[in-house]
Amino acid sequence: MHEDAGEPPIGVDRSAEITTELLGGLSETVIAGESFLEAIVTGVLAKQHVLIEDVPGTGKTLTAQSLAGALGLEFNRIQFTPDLLPSDITGSTIFNEGNGDFEFRRGPVFSNIVLADEINRAPPKTQAALLEVMEEKQVSVGNTTYALPEPFFVIATQNPVEQEGTFELPESQRDRFIIKTSIGYPDRTNERLLLDRRIERMVAAPSVDQVVDPETFKTVQEVPEYIHVAPDVRDYIVDIGRATREHQRTDVGVSPRGIQRLLEASRARAVIRGRDYVVPNDVKQLAVDVFAHRLVLNAAALIDGVSRRDVVSDVLSEIAVPAIEA
């Protein structure tokens, strides 16, 4: 740990136990791979937002609902549509005839976990309304600023196969998400398990038991700040990020914010693993999910069918992995 950081508010071992319980609770309701669930918990543990891109019916909404239930947090879902206005998200000022004054009615964004469902279906102006909310965790109306509840994070979804009538997220908004991930289709065994679980309950949607109280989880969220990151690992993170800017397939590489987000995600992953230090493999495993959605590819890459994830994987293969002693 840092020499002057002191001790974390809760032990790393206990934090790892809590995140393991959280992952276990999610796996009881969401049929998904371990890597997907870890990506979600990594983002939340790092106090950042997560973008899920996948086809309908794979469990994106259920994931957000289950996470809120497992953490005992308030949950709101916003269905993004082409006619959605910024005030539909943040709230609006209305005239109260009873007291003859104007008052602010809070929008659905005032919640602990906000599911921005099919975020790319809303027009750019409405998407932009989320920028301050996601970055500053507050809503400004006139001269008044309203703080959002803590903890607060956005889980946004988008559908990759129906692009008609959608608005691609601008680079500035994609950069606000620490991780972009996908669930994918389950294998045959898990798809059969999905049916078995449905047979065993009397309602369509499964529910999850709360595994930790909100205040305890807020304490766990502070633990990544105490995780040690060796100088060679910091160099490794910087080298990967800078290499994306120089890659022949990119017009725009990873921003300094993106490099910082990989550091934060790596620290959170170390907590999940029960370590008080980051190892290079933490960085390597997270780099694609943290970096790929931040890239802007050039025309040649698009013509050749090269994906953003391909570019980051290529960079990882070229950068030497530092040898760090545990």
Image (cartoon, grey):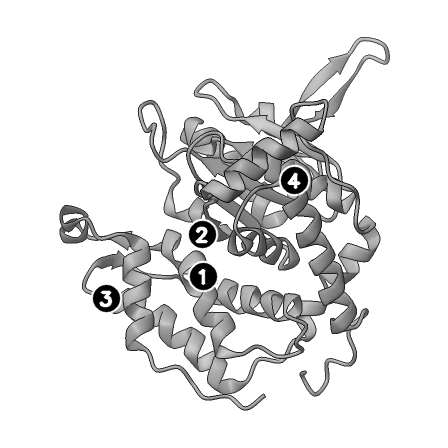
| Callouts 1 and 2 close, C-beta under 8 Å | yes
Residue count near mark 3 (Cα–Cα under 10 Å), binned few <14, some 14–19, many ≥20: some
3 or 2: mark nearer the eye: 3
Q: Which residue is mark 4?
A: 29
Q: Tell me the distance, in whole angstroms, between the alpha carbons under discs 3 and 4.
A: 41 Å
286, 260: nearer the viewer: 286
The percent coordinates of residue 239 (x first, y second) are: 37, 76
Q: Which mark is residue 240?
A: none
The amino acid on which the numbered mark 4 sits, given as a three-letter code, is Thr
- Answer left or right for 292 relative to 38: left
Amino acid type shown at disc 3: His
Label 2 secondary element? loop
The mark closer to the camera, 2 or 4, is 4
The amino acid sitting under disc 2 is Asp
* Residue bearing the label numbered 2: 175
Circle 1 residues within 10 Å: few <14, some 14–19, many ≥20:
many
Residue 258 tag number: 1
Spatial separation of the CA atoms under disc 1 and disc 3: 16 Å
Say which label, 1 or 3, has the lower sequence index. 3
Check the picture and name the quadrant holding the C terminus: bottom right
Asked whether disc 1 touches disc 3, contact meaning CB atoms under 8 Å apart, the reply is: no
Please name whichever residue, 207 or 304, is drawn nearer the observer in this view of the structure: 207
Q: Residue furthest right?
A: 99
Q: Which mark is residue 247?
A: 3
Of mark 1 and mark 4, the one earlier in the sequence is: 4
Q: Position of residue 122 (x, y in %)?
A: 45, 27
The structure residue drawn at horizontal position 45% and vertical position 30%, both measured from the top left corner, is 56
Q: Disc 2 and disc 4: Cα gap in Å?
A: 30 Å
Q: At 66% from the left edge and 36% from the top edge, which residue is drawn? A: 65
Q: Is residue 298 above or below residue 147?
A: below
